[in-house]
Image (cartoon, rainbow, N blue to C red):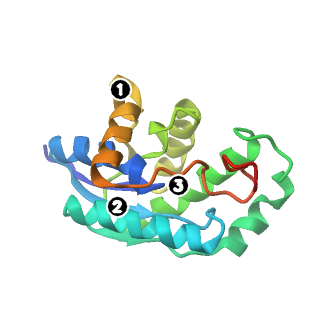
Amino acid sequence: MEMNKRILLHCCCAPDSTVPLRRLLEEGWDIVCAFYGSNIHPEEEFRWRLEEMAKVADLNEVPLKVLPYDPDSWLRSSVLLAGEPEGGARCGLCFALQLKAAARCAVEAGCGFLCTTLTISPHKDPVRICRIGKAISDKNGLLWLDRTWRKGGGFQESVRESRRLGLRRQNYCGCRYCVKGDGTV
């Protein structure tokens, strides 16, 4: 293939990265991972997720770019949507903030393509994510790789792979507005 097969894979967390990384590597992509975590609260959770992501990137022998951790900026951008339900407008804004940061990183890293692991989650709308990702890619001169990673048992496979690697699967997206499984925010 003549076009640039270098792709930036936006990684929301280590467990969700397992299947996309393996599949892209099997397809022959030159992958750069980028971890965005400004939406993750508290900072200890961000640090834990970053350590796990570094482990997965290292195991797959791919470079990991860590995008700046700026939770105050994320909070300023999202505070007017604090009352939105999970899956509402705040989530769309968060997807866009993550993918804009990833697109900038992709351009800097010389990637021709952008993709995300967000579409592996059964709790997120892959059509919405891919629509946002394509628009951002277009604005940044990138090609969007439209993948819904949960298809074909991808989510269940990521659960098995996380277990095999000893990765903790978190029970919330990371956002301070999202309720954790224990009822706290």
Q: Position of residue 4 (x, y in %)?
A: 22, 53
Q: CA distance from mark 3 to mark 2?
A: 12 Å
- The mark that comes first in sequence, 2 or 1, is 2
Residue at image x 57%, y 43%?
132
How many numbered marks, from 0 up?
3
Residue that label 1 marks = 153
Comparing marks 2 and 1, which lies closer to the viewer? 1
Up the image or down, 72 lies above or below 59; here it is: below
Secondary structure beneath dot 2 equals: strand
Numbered tag placed on residue 36 in the rendering: none
Q: Position of residue 184 (x, y in %)?
A: 76, 54
- The mark that comes first in sequence, 3 or 2, is 2
Q: Position of residue 57 (x, y in %)?
A: 29, 62
**Marks 1 and 3: in contact by CB < 8 Å?**
no
- The mark that comes first in sequence, 3 or 1, is 3
Secondary structure beneath dot 1 equals: helix
Q: Position of residue 123 (x, y in %)?
A: 58, 35
Residue at image x 82%, y 60%?
79
The quadrant holding residue 112 is bottom left
Check disc 2 and give the amino acid type.
Answer: Cys
Work out which quarter of the rendered image holds the N terminus and state it.
Answer: top left
Residue that label 2 marks = 33
Q: Viewed as shown, does residue 89 lie left or right of 23? A: right
Check disc 3 and give the amino acid type.
Answer: Leu
**Marks 2 and 3: in contact by CB < 8 Å?**
no
Up the image or down, 38 lies above or below 98; here it is: below
Up the image or down, 141 lies above or below 160; here it is: below
Numbered tag placed on residue 99 in the rendering: 3
**Marks 1 and 2: in contact by CB < 8 Å?**
no
Q: Viewed as shown, does residue 154 lie left or right of 172? A: left
Crowd around label 1: few <14 · some 14–19 · many ≥20 (10 Å):
few
